[in-house]
Amino acid sequence: MSFITKVILVTGGNKGIGYAIVRNLALSYANLSSSQPLTILLTARNPILGQNSTDQLHEELKPKNVLTNYGGNVNLKFLRLDITDEQSIKDVKKVIEKDYGGLDVLINNAAIAFKGDAFDVNVVSTTFATNFYGTLNLINHFYPLIRPNGRIVNVSSSVGRLYIVSKALGQEFSKEDLDMDGLIELMKRFEDAVEKDTYKQEGWPRQAYAVSKLGLMIMTKILARRADKEGNNIKVFSCCPGWVKTDMAGERAPLTPDQGAKIPVLLALDENIVIQNPNGSFLKEKKNSKL
């Protein structure tokens, strides 16, 4: 079977930044005037909300002449995907293998955050289950599907930087030879420290979300080193969309979801931004681009 379509999968695509990423991928790809069709797989864990969002996007994009049924070259499809559910991940992987033969871009946007100052071992384990372990498990399953010259874009946050932990921990996270097992061990040390209430003494912050995003940023660097060694030209980036007005960030945030979607969309589609930044980079603002 011949697979001619470019394929981009977006997790957590039914609302907020994820929804805006899907919409702007479609609009931006149409502006590139590419002869290759694009399939965007909008995924979400709730099948009703995910399908409703996909239907809504079809209605929004119909007058723009970007969808394949309306004069364009972009196909939009919903797939149910819960990144904390092993079977759900395997089911989607089978669909991709059968229908598309692989992925060109994986955008890991799905994430959770507890509101207020809630902080205990349950908050940490629940946050990590999606933001770190779920994302890592998804990548482990989907990485073999990424075609040469493909990309992985991890939507992270500026709160997940090395300065949130002690200097000693920062040095451990920064080791050039740190592998995924070593990173998992560091993340489990935080979980254990919270359970024992020794996290302050050990140099950790009182921030489950921030540590989960620090783990995601370092995960990105480890995956980039792997890709560079394998020589398949797969590029892996993490990025901060900014403080965006969403259900998670609240109404006080100054940016719209469309503004927050800019960097993930650039990293998915633009060649200049990939050439200008080393593999494994963390990006906060857009740079030179024709998009």
Image: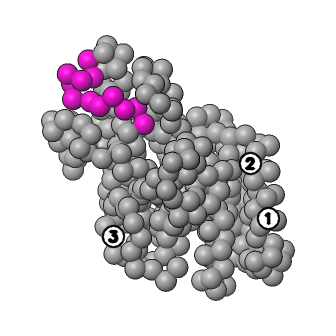
Residue 140 percent location from the top left of the image: 49, 45
Does residue 76 appear left or right of residue 182 in this picture? right
In the image, residue 233 sits, relative to residue 48, either above or below, namely below
Point out the frontmost of discs 2 and 3. 2
Residue that appears at 80% across and 76% down? 63
Q: Nearer the viewer, residue 250 or 6?
A: 250
Whole-Å distance between the Cαs marked 2 and 1?
Answer: 12 Å
Q: Which residue is mark 1?
A: 58
Residue 92 percent location from the top left of the image: 68, 47
Circle 2/circle 1 CB separation < 8 Å: no
For label 2, the crowd category at 10 Å Cα-Cα, with few meaning under 14, some 14 to 19 and many 20 or more, is: many
Q: Earlier in the sequence, mark 1 or mark 3?
A: 1
Span highlighted in magenta in the image: 198-209
Q: Which residue is mark 3?
A: 277
In the image, residue 48 sits, relative to residue 29, either above or below, namely above
Residue 219: tell me if it is visible.
no
